[in-house]
């Protein structure tokens, strides 16, 4: 994995990177080439809500089918345990 992320005021984050970098043998079995899977993403944080979007290939490298991946995270405040002294 290789990537970079830039954030602005702990509100929005932009990401780009590559993964699954490897040398592959072509179908004719005589040549090799480097293959990789690029990906892009953006994340937004609004209070306890984290919304994340990624455009990436999560399947087989032989097929160039990219996916839109959306995730939502809700951060819950930690509970304070009273002191038992």
Image (tube, rainbow, N blue to C red):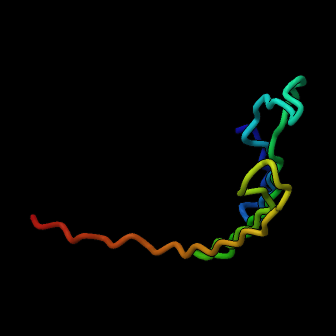
The percent coordinates of residue 16 (x first, y second) are 82, 49
Pick whichever, 13 or 34, lies toward us.
34
Pick whichever, 81 or 1, lies toward us.
1
Extreme residue toward the front, this view: 28
The percent coordinates of residue 42 (x first, y second) are 79, 63
Q: Residue shown at 82%/62% (left/top)? A: 66
Q: Please, is residue 27 above or below residue 57 in the view?
A: above
Q: Please, is residue 13 above or below residue 51 in the view?
A: above
The percent coordinates of residue 80 (x first, y second) are 31, 71
Q: Please, is residue 13 above or below residue 48 in the view?
A: above
Pick whichever, 53 or 61, lies toward us.
61
The percent coordinates of residue 59 (x first, y second) are 72, 56
Q: Quadrant of the C terminus?
A: bottom left
Q: Residue shown at 74%/65% (left/top)? A: 43
The quarter of the picture where residue 7 lies is bottom right
Q: Residue shown at 62%/76% (left/top)? A: 49
The quarter of the picture where residue 28 lies is top right
Compared across the picture, whether 14 is left or right of 1 comes to: right
Q: Quadrant of the N terminus?
A: top right
Extreme residue toward the left, this view: 85
Pick whichever, 29 or 18, lies toward us.
29
Count of numbered marks: 0
Compared across the picture, whether 70 is left or right of 55 comes to: left
């Amino acid at each position: 994995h290789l990537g970079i992320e830039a954030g602005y005021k702990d509100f929005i984050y932009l990401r780009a990177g590559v993964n699954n970098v490897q040398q592959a043998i072509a179908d004719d079995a005589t040549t090799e080439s480097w293959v990789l899977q690029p990906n892009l993403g953006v994340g937004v944080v609004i209070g306890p809500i984290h919304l994340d979007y990624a455009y990436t290939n999560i399947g087989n490298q032989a097929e160039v089918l990219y996916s839109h991946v959306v995730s939502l995270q809700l951060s819950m405040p930690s509970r304070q345990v009273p002191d038992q002294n």
